[in-house]
Image (cartoon, rainbow, N blue to C red):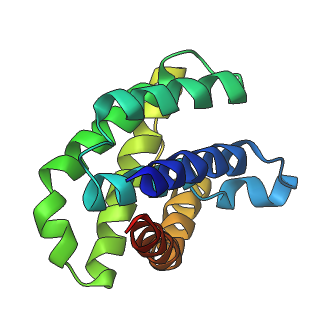
Amino acid sequence: MKGERKLKILSSILALILMILPLPEWAVAYRPNWILLVVVFWIVYAADSMGITVVWFLGICLDLLSGSTLGQHPVSLMVCAFIIIQLQQSFKIYPIGQQCLVIVFLVLIYLAITRWLFGAKPVIDDWSFWMSCLTTAFLWPWAFVLLRELRRNSLASDL
């Protein structure tokens, strides 16, 4: 269990770093939502220790690191976490393509809430709105496989 806890902390820290990593101007619209990928994985596959409180803390950390309005990311992450908690059992048995569609839906909700709380209208016809959703969904299979293998190795090393 200690190895899995360390892996959750390390993957969350890495996701936070990737979320604030400076990108070229043209690539900002394509930035995947790394923190949401990590939160979805840990809620679905190790829900015992990744709850709403931990998600709230990660959102506060993201707010502090990115300099955004305090509370903007925690609210968005908690809504997405609540949705994925409700879908947890069925999400596990979805094929990977259907999981990617759920990820697109979650990122859309996340972005809409964050933009709404920021004071901007969540304009869905804006191409940058969709690019982040698509890149996040495109990266889900690789993030899932990587985190799953790391989790298996950490669980095996605990035995």
Left or right of residue 93, residue 63 in this image: right
Residue 143 shown left or right of residue 66 in the figure: left
Q: Is residue 116 above or below residue 84?
A: above
Q: Position of residue 88 (x, y in %)?
A: 17, 58
- Quarter of the image for residue 11 reads bottom right
123 left or right of 31? left
User: Quadrant location of residue 95?
Assistant: bottom left
Q: Residue at x 35, y 45 (%)?
A: 109
Residue at the farthest front position: 159
Q: Does residue 1 sit above or below 68 in this rendering?
A: below
Q: How many marks?
A: 0
Q: Position of residue 3 (x, y in %)?
A: 48, 56
Quadrant in the picture for the C terminus: bottom left
Q: Write the residue at 47% across / 43% down.
A: 111
10 and 18: which is toward the camera:
10
Query: Where in the figure is residue 1, as x and y percent of width and height?
Result: 37, 53
Nearest the viewer among 70 and 148 is 148
Q: Position of residue 27 (x, y in %)?
A: 77, 60
Residue sitting at 19 percent across and 78 percent down? 94
Outermost residue toward the top?
A: 70
